[in-house]
Amino acid sequence: MSSEQDHLKETDTEARFDFKQKERSAVRSEKGLTEEVIRMISEDKDEPEWMLERRLRALKQYHAMPMPTDWPGQPDLSELDVEEIVPYIRPDVDKREGVDDWDELPDDIKDTFEKLGIPEAERKALSGVGAQYESEIVYQNMQEQWEEKGVVFMNMDQAVKEHPEIVKEHFMTTCVPPSDNKFAALHGAVWSGGSFVYVPEDVTVEMPVQAYFRMNSEGMGQFEHTLIVAEPGSEVHYIEGCSAPKYGKHNLHSGGVEVFVKEGAHVQYSTVQNWSKNTFNLNTKRALVDADGTMEWISGSMGSKATMLYPCSILKGRGATDTHITIAFAGEGQDIDTGAKVYHNAPNTKSTIESKSISKDGGRTNYRGLVHIADGAEGSSTAVECDALMFDNESTSDTMPYMEIEESKVDVAHEATVGKIGDEDIFYLQSRGLDDDDAKKMIVAGFIEPITEELPIEYAVELNRLIELEMEGSLG
Amino acid sequence: MSTTQVHANLTDAQVREISGNLEEPEWMLETRLDALEALETLDMPDVIRTPGRDWTNLHGLDFEAFVDPLNAAEDKDQVGPEDVDVLSWGDALAEHEELVREHFGSIIDPQENYLTALSTALFTTGTVIYVPEGVDAEDVTIRTEQHSRSLFNYTLVITEESSSVTILERQSTGTALEDEQYYSGIVEIAAGENSYVQYGSLQNLDEDSYCFTAKRGETDTYATINWIEGNIGTKLTKTETSTLLAGDSSETQIVGAFFGHNDQHFDLDVKVWHRAEHTTADLVTRGVTDDTARSVYEGVQNVGRDAWDTSSYQRENTLMLSDESEADASPKLIINNHDTEASHSATVGQIDEEDLLYMTSRGVSPRLARNMLVEGFFVPVLEEVAVDELREDLETLIRERLEN
C-alpha cells in the first residue's frame, strides 16, 4: 500500500503532522555528550548547583552503561549514534519560561501548534496546556480555577526554580534513577523541558491537562521530563501528544516520566505518540503507587522508526491498582517494541493490561511485558490480554510476556492471540457495498474499539484518523 | 563465554577411549573431538533473562565435581517389538552406520551450546530406534538407571514413511549413589513422511541430581511428533522439548506435567517452529510447586515467513501450594506470517478456597481435599497422555509426592 508508486494523498490530517518549519534557535548545543555540553545546558538554564551535579552524575552513569543489545528480538539500534545527536536546542522566543498567550509566540511556532490543533483543544476541553518546541516549553497556561485550588502545572525547568523542595525530593531519585537504564541515564544528563504537575490533597482536576511536544529540527534529541505528584485523595488526567516532521537524519526522543500516586489518588496518563519514522523513541515512564491509589496508562504508539517503551507501575501500597491500555500500529520500516511492567509489592494489589497491535507492510509490533508478584503480595491479581492483527506476510507480530510469581495467594492470567484480518469479514463488508480499503479500515476500527473507547473523545478521533492515514500509507 | 571450565579435566584421550569402546567409525570420533574442542568457546544454553536477573543459574553448576565420563555406569533396558530395530549405539553403528551418519547431530547441532557439546563429546550410552516403512509399533521401552556420578545418554529415532511408533523412556537413579550426580540426555527424532511418533519421557531422578536434556524432532510432510514430558525428580532440571515442523501439513503436540517440592528447580522450555504450510501445534503444560520449589517455563511458538495457514496453541497453568515457592512463565509468540491463528495463555494461582471449604464441609479432611484438588488439576493434562502406562506412572508419582 505504501510502495513507491503509491499516490500520496494530500489530506488535512497529513498536513497537520508532516510539515516543517525553518529551524529557529537561540542556543544550539554541540553534537554528542560531553561534560561541556551538560554544563552549557545547565548554565543556559541558570540551574541551581544540585541539578548540575545530578546531570553530571547521570552522564557518568550513561558512559559506564552498555547499550541494551541483548534482549531477544529487540529493535535494531545500530543506526542510532547518540554522539551525532544535538541534545539541546533552545528556540528563539522572547520569554524563557514560555508565554501564556498564543499570540505572543513567533508566527511559525504558533502556526505549528495551530496546525496541530492545540489552541483549539485548549479552549474546548482542557484545564491547561503546555507546548514544547525542540528543547523548551514555549507556551504554558493553566485555567485560573485550578490555580486557585493550588494545582500547579508548569514547565519542568521553571519548577526546578519555583518548587525546588518538591523537585529535589522526587526528580530521578526513587522512581526513575538514572542508573535504571542507559537511556534513563542519558535523559538525566541532558533533560530539558517537560511538565511539572502538582495536585494538592483531595483536589480533583476534572478536565485533563495536556502537554504537546514538537520536534522540528533535523538530527536533534528531545528529552523532556514529566513529573507528576498527586497528593492523597487527588485526581488528575494528564495527556501528552508528540510529533515531528521527517528528515533524513535520525532523531532521538528519550523522555522521562515519573508519577507519584499518593494514598487514594488517581492519575491517568494518556499518550498518543506519532513521531516521524526516522525517530528512535526510547523512554522510561514509571509510577509509584501508594495504598489504594490508581494509576492508568493509556498509550497509542503510531510513529517512530523504533520504539522501546514499557510504562511501569510499582504498586507499593496495599490495595493499589494499575491499568494499562496500549495500542501499537507498525507500518513499513517500523519496529514498535512496547508493553507494560507491573510490580506487585503489596497485598491486594490489582493490575489489568490490555494490549492491541496491528502490523502491516513489513512493520513489526511486539508486546514485551513483565508482571512481578513479590513474596508477601497476597491477594493480588493480574490479567493480561494481548491481541495482534496482521495484514500481510511481510509483517511480524510477537508477544513476549514474562511473569515472575513469588506468592501463592494470587490470581495471574495471561492470554494472547494472533490472527490475520478475516477474509470472510472483508467479503461480508464488500458484499454490503464497501470497497476493500474501507472494509479493512472498518475491521481495524472494530479491533481497537475496546481501547479507543477509554480515550477522551478528541484523542479517540485523532487516533482513529491516524490509523486511517496509516492504512492509506500516506503518513511520512 | 562460559565461566564453567570443565575441559581442563577432559582430554582427547578420554574421548578416544569412549569412542573406541563403542567401536565407532572415524567420522563419529571426529564429531566428538570437535565438540570437545568447541567447549572452550561455547556458552551455556539460553535461559530467560530480565534485566539484572538470570531465571536459572546454570553457571552455578559444579561440573568439576560430577563429570566423570570414564566411570559411567547404568542399568539399561531397551526393548521393542520384532519389526522395529531398538539398538544400542554399538549395534546401531554395526547395522545402520549410513542411517546414523545421516541423522546424528542433524536435528540438534552438537555445538549448539556448551551442554549439547559436552553430551556429544562424552556420551557412553544410548539407543537408536529405527522403524522401517509401513511398520506400526507400540511399546518401545527404554529404561535407564544411573549408577555413576555422571551419565551421558543419546537417543536417535528414525521413522520411515507411513510408519508409527510409541516410545517410553524413563530415567531414575540407582540406590547406591551418594553425593550429587549429573544426567545429560539428547533425543533427536527424524520423522519420515506421514509417520507418527509418540515419545513419552518420565524423569524421576534422585533429588541430589542435576539434569540437562534436549529433545527435538523434525517432521517431514504429514508427519506427527507427539511428546509427553513428565518431570518429577532432580534438584535442578533444564530441559527443552521442541519440534521443528519442516514438512507441509505436519503436526505436533507437547504435553508436560511437573511437580516440584522442597528446593527443586525446573526450567522447562517448550518450543515449536512452524516452517511449512498447514502445520498445527498444541502445547499444554501443567505443574505444581510446593515448599520452596521453583518453576521456570518458557514456551515459544515461532511461525516462519513461509508457514502459511498455521494453527498454534499454547497453555500453561501453574498451581502454587506454598508462599515460598516461585512460578515464572514466559509464553512467547513470534509470528512472521499473517495467515496464522495462534494463541497462548498462562495462569498461576493457588487452590481455590471455596473448593476446599466445600470439600471439608462434606467431611473430607483438609489434607485429603488438597490432594484431591491437586490430582484434579493434573487431569486435563493426563487426559492428553495417550499412553496408558505412562499416564498411570505419572499418576502414581503425583500421588506419592502428595502423600509424603
Image (tube, helix red, strand yellow):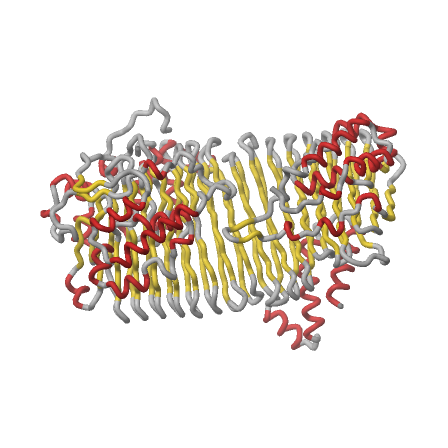
Q: Residue furthest right?
A: B82
Question: Is residue B350 visible in this depiction of the protein?
Answer: yes
Residue B304, x across and y down, in percent: 55, 34
Q: Is residue A304 left or right of residue A354?
A: left
The quarter of the image holding the N terminus of chain B is top right
Q: Is A453 in front, or is B92?
A: B92
Q: Residue furthest left?
A: A103
Q: Is B232 in front, or is B363?
A: B232
Residue B393, x across and y down, in percent: 79, 55
Q: Is residue A351 left or right of residue B21?
A: left
Q: Is residue B32 left or right of residue A40?
A: right
Quadrant of res B138: top right
Q: Is B31 in front, or is A13?
A: B31
Residue B64, x across and y down, in percent: 73, 49
As displayed, is residue A414 above or below residue A288? above
Q: Residue furthest top?
A: A5
Q: Is B130 in front, or is B209?
A: B209
Count how many numbered circles sit on residues in the image.
Answer: 0
The quarter of the image holding the C terminus of chain B is bottom right
Q: Residue, x 13% and y 50% (percent of image)?
A: A95
Residue A269, x across and y down, in percent: 33, 56
Q: Residue, x 74% and y 41% (percent of image)?
A: B119
